[in-house]
Amino acid sequence: MFNEFELLRRNVSDQNPLKVAAYCRVSTESAEQDISFKAQIEYYTNLIQSNPNWEFAGIFADKKSGMNIKDRAEFRKMMRKCYFGQINLIFTKSVSRFGRNVLDTLSCLQKLADKNITVYFEEQGIHSLSHDALMAIGMLSIHAQQEVSGQRPKCVLGHSTKL
């Protein structure tokens, strides 16, 4: 089926390439998450650089919780580049990798939409500029935020009982 992503790929002239970036994130420094972090960076670097119609605008990667934008320096750097017109399209693995705070996520997506910048959430197959995307992303963000909220009591209990 023909989708918006294909449209983005086909309608770019060689004179005005699409400036494409990716945002990667893991929340801890564990060995397992480090493997995921490196895999995300390698995958998106190869994906973007392999398309001759795209200009590589960077990989922005944080090893921080997705609950707070102010703690994610690379995310803020990416948003600044978007503000200055240096990025047109952002790839990210999933809504939860983009952020786990519903208000921050939707606020950032609205700022990007105001500049006609789309975020493509690969796991969900969602383009942030599609007509029904914000509702779906909002629901997924709520779920991602609740996942973190649900994990905190378990972590505290685990640490207190040394499990």
Image (spheres, rainbow, N blue to C red):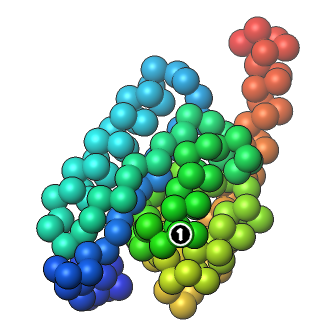
Look at the image and tell me in which quarter the C terminus lies: top right
The picture places residue 27, in percent across and down from the top left corner, at: 60, 36
Q: Position of residue 68 (x, y in %)?
A: 74, 47
Snapshot quadrant of residue 122: bottom left
Left of 24 or right of it: where is 12? left
**Is 140 left or right of 11, judged from the image as shown?**
right
* Apparent side of residue 122 relative to residue 162 in the rendered image (left or right): left
Pick the quarter of the image with the N terminus: bottom left
Q: Quadrant of residue 72?
A: top right
Point out residue 13 in the picture as x, y percentages from the top left corner: 20, 85
**Is 58 or 106 nearer to us in this picture?**
58
Residue at the disc numbered 1:
84
Q: Secondary structure at mark 1?
A: loop
Residue 83 position in % (x across, y down): 57, 69
Tell me if I can see residue 76 in this picture: yes
Q: Amino acid at mark 1?
A: Phe
Q: Which residue is drawn at the image coordinates 30% and 82% (left, top)?
A: 8
